[in-house]
Image (cartoon, helix red, strand yellow):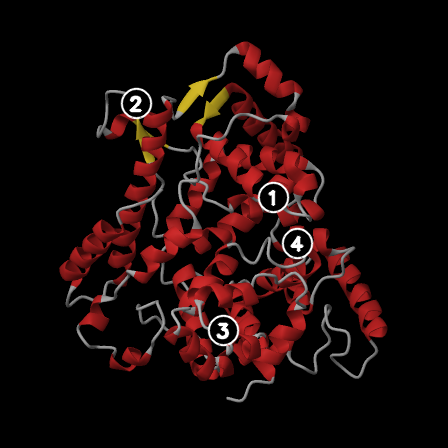
Amino acid sequence: MLQEESDLSLVIAQIVQKLKGSNLYAQLERQAWGSWEKRILKSLNSMCTELSIPLARKRPVGEQKELLNKWNEMGTDEPDLSLFRPVYAPKDFLEVLINLRNPNYENGDSLSFRTHLGLIQVPLKVKGIPELKEFFVELGLTTGQLGIDDSTQVPPELFENEHVRIGQKVLAEQDSAAAQQYIRQGSPTALRAELWALILNISSQPEDILYYEQLKTNVIQHDLLVDSLIYKDVKLTASNDDYYFVFEDYLYQVLLCFSRDTSVLGHFAYNSASPPKSYIRGKLGLEEYAVFYPPNGVIPFHGFSMYVAPLCFLYHEPSKLYQIFREMYVRFFFRLHSISSHPSGIVSLCLLFETLLQTYLPQLFYHLREIGAQPLRISFKWMVRAFSGYLATDQLLLLWDRILGYNSLEILAVLAAAVFAFRAVNLMEVTSLAAAEAVLADLSTLKVMPLLQIFLFATVT
C-alpha cells in the first residue's frame, strides 16, 4: 500500500543534516510532517488515477435526491468498495515516528537519552511516575472513583449517590471548570452527556443546527473521493464491532459532514501539520487555484471512524453528536495522528509509554525487545485510537472522562503501560512478537480504573 520506507528514511536523514547544530525541533516536526503528507497525497492521487475517478464532483440531481431520501439509512446501502483502500494505517505512521531523530541528540547534547532502548529516538521530556502521581492525584488509592468497587472505606453506593448529587449541582450551576474538575473522579452514566457538553462548551443553539444542515447539504450536492474512504473505514471497523455496528448510519452522517467543515481548519494554527491542497485541473502549483482537500483538511486513515463511535452512546441528536465529535477532535484526537513535541502528541505518548516500561518493568521491556517484540509495536494502535474498539464501551467512557477532566492524553500512555504490567507474567513466557500480540489481543475484559490506580500508586519508585 505505502511502499517507499527507505526513501522516507533518506528524506528524514537529509532533514536532520540540515538542522545539525540547531535546537529548532519545530522545524524537524514540519519537515517530517511534510514528507509524510506527500506520501499520503501520493497514495490518494494514485487511487484517483487507478480508479479513474475525480477527487470531487457535483452529484447529478437524481443522485442528490436518492442520497437525501436514504440519509437516515445509509448503512443499508452497499456501494462497491472493493477497489478502495485506506490511505494509511497506524502501523505505517509508526514507521515514520521511528525514523524521527532530533539534531541535538545526534550532536551528543542529550547523552542521558542514549540509555533509552525503545523505538522512539527523540529525547522529549516526559513525566516519570512521581510526576504522574502528582498530575493524576485525584486517581489516588484513597480517593473515591467511579469504576472501582472498593477503592475507599466509603461503601461504593454511598460514594456514587453523593457523587451524583454533586454532579447534578455542577450541571445546575453550568460551571465548565467545576465540571472538568468533577469528572476526574468519573462521570455517572446518566450525567455524562451533559457534563461532556458543558466541559466542551457545546450547546444546541438554532445556528448550530443550521450549520449542521448546511454541511449536510454540501454532502448531498458534492461527492468526494474521501467519502468512499469513510464508507470503507466504517465497514472495516465499526460495522464489525459488537458495540458499535448499530450506529453505522450516525457514523456516516457525522463523518461525511465533518469532511466538509472548513471550521476544522482552525486547529492547524496550533498544529505542526498543514492542510493538504488540491489544484484546479491544469493549474498545478498556482496558489490562487489551490483549495484545501478535503475541505476540513483531514484525510481519514484506517480506524478514524472509531473516534466517533463511542460518542453515539451518549448523543442521539445528529447535530449535537456532530458538535461534540468536532470539538473532541480539534482539542484532542488530532494530536494522535500528528507529528509534534506536545505532551499530548503521539510522539510524546509513545516515548512516555516506552520510558515507563523501561524504567519500572525493565525485565519485561528487555525480554520483549530481545525476542523482537518491541512493546510499542503492540500498544501503538491502542493509543492512536484512544483505545476505542479495544476496551468495553463502559470502560472506554470512564477513560475518556479522565481525558476531558485532565485536558490531557497522557493517560493513554499510562494505561498502555499498565496493561503490559497486568499481563507481565504471561508476557515473560512468550518467545515471539506474534505470541506477545496473542497475549494482548483481547482487552475487552479489563477494568481501566483499577489498572491505572495500581500502576500509578502501587508501583515502587
**Amino acid marked by disc 2:** Ile
Q: Which x, y percent locates residue 257? A: 55, 33
**Residue at which label 2 appears:** 280
**Amino acid marked by disc 1:** Ala
Mark 3 and mark 4: span between their CA atoms?
Answer: 41 Å
Q: Name the residue: 72% across, 40% down.
A: 316
Asked if the residues shown at circle 4 and circle 2 are in contact, with their CB atoms under 8 angstroms apart, the answer is: no
**Residue at which label 4 appears:** 196
Q: Name the residue: 34% across, 27% down.
A: 50
Callout 3 environment at 10 Å: few (<14), some (14 to 19), or many (20+)?
Answer: some
**Residue at which label 3 appears:** 430
Residue 238 marker: 1
Sequence-wise, the earlier of marks 1 and 4 is 4
Residue 427 visible in image? yes
The answer to which image quadrant residue 99 occupies is bottom left
**Amino acid marked by disc 3:** Val
Sequence-wise, the earlier of marks 4 and 2 is 4
Residue 204 visible in image? no
Tell me the mark number nearer the camera, choosing from 4 and 2.
2
Sequence-wise, the earlier of marks 3 and 4 is 4
Mark 4 and mark 2: span between their CA atoms?
Answer: 41 Å
**Amino acid marked by disc 4:** Trp
Residue projecting furthest to the bottom: 460
The answer to which image quadrant residue 53 occupies is top left
Does residue 211 appear to the left or right of 314 in the view shown?
A: left
Callout 4 environment at 10 Å: few (<14), some (14 to 19), or many (20+)?
Answer: many
Sequence-wise, the earlier of marks 2 and 3 is 2
Under tag 3, what secondary structure?
loop
Mark 1 and mark 2: span between their CA atoms?
Answer: 34 Å
**In the figure, 375 relative to 334: above or below?**
below
Q: Which x, y percent locates residue 270? A: 39, 52
Callout 2 environment at 10 Å: few (<14), some (14 to 19), or many (20+)?
Answer: few
